[in-house]
Amino acid sequence: MKILLVGGGTSGHVLPTLSVGRSILAKDPGANILYLGSLKLGDRSLATEAGFRFIGVPAGKWRRYFDLRNVVDILITLAGIIVAFLIVLFFWPDRIFIKGGYVGLPVGIAAWLLRRPIILHESDAVMGTANRMLMKFARQVCVSFPLEVYPRSKKLVYTGVPVNELFFSKEVGDLPVKLREDMPLVLVIGGSQGARAVNKLVRGAAEELAKHYQIVHLAGGLDYATLHRWLAGSEVHNYYLFDFLPSTKIATLTKKAAVVISRAGATVIAEIAAVGRPAILIPLPGAANNHQYLNAKYLADRGAAVLLEQSSATPGLLIEKVNKIIGSDLGKRLSFNITAFSKKDASARIAELLLG
């Protein structure tokens, strides 16, 4: 069977799609899989390192405000439709899996023109723009939150977010640093997309937090050099700074963490839920359709995470919330409640839909 996997632009789109690809091969080792992502080098490297053939597709990112770049991006998307049309025509997949995002739009339109079956996946608590546009063409739409969160449709299937199997494994791999056993770990997952405010917040709280906890901070590439210079000139101890780490290391650190501080993208939430760790979620303001806030609020309303809005966040408030969670009944409740949102079989269920 020929399967076309589509997802790119951020690791939050690529990594779950790769998990689906691995599940397909586990069920059908002879499956012929081709991965389509954005033209970003990160998409290509992640897909090829996982062993999948990769082709980049031009795709414009639509902005929800007046911007002359929208005109350029419309032209880029039109070019992407032509490229995707040719790929779909010559590869002629039996099924196409689209993991939302702007890369999926030109491929989805091409697939519809050629009448190839589409299965979508929506990670967030609100349907993304591309998925809303493609939903009418799709056979099924896999979603990550319970069905009542979304507008009613017979196409919806509650699967959860596909997560790397490493997060479910009881085995603990090698750590990127040697950690003390007598101090709780605070794991900060920033990333490159809009995490500057989180990095600044953690920097302001680091000196006080590091008196009682170990901190591993994944800052992303944008602020790494600045934070590294600050750390070198400071007297902060028990603080370990990285730009990026592979999934193997992130999974190990998440298992070791007493609390995770993160943005509120659906993929990182699913990884935290898979391990069952208390989380402080700081949604990215202005994220498309306000999806990060809605993700975090859904969990916070059910006692499964702490929501800290960026507009009101201060280093002192962050310190207060970390102290309230670690070693307390609140931390235990958060850890227990968030596991309800983990779907261990998400990748396998989506693979079954694609192979069925």
Image: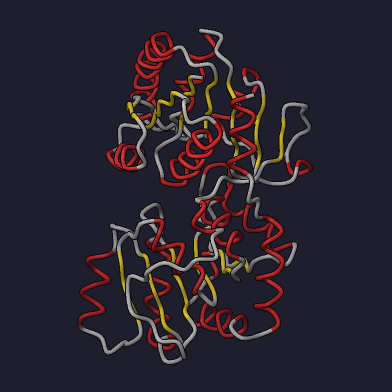
Taking 280 as reference, is 5 left or right? left
**Relative to the observer, which residue lies in front, 164 or 58?**
164
Q: How is the image coloured?
A: secondary structure
Q: Residue at x 58, y 36 (%)?
A: 128
Q: How many marks?
A: 0
Residue 105 screen position, x and y as percent: 48, 24
Would residue 141 be seen by someone viewing this image from the given angle? yes
Residue 94 screen position, x and y as percent: 53, 16
In this rendering, is residue 201 above or below 345? below
Quadrant housing the C terminus: top right
In this rendering, is residue 71 above or below 43? above
Q: Residue at x 49, y 57 (%)?
A: 166
Q: What residue occupies the far front of the structure in this picture?
A: 29
Residue 131 screen position, x and y as percent: 58, 30
Q: Residue at x 41, y 14 (%)?
A: 91
Quadrant of the rendered structure where residue 326 is? bottom right
Taking 200 as reference, is 141 left or right? right
Taking 53 as reference, is 228 left or right? left
Would residue 64 be seen by someone viewing this image from the given angle? no
Residue 13 screen position, x and y as percent: 47, 41
Quadrant of the rendered structure where residue 174 is? bottom left
Q: Residue at x 75, y 62 (%)?
A: 302
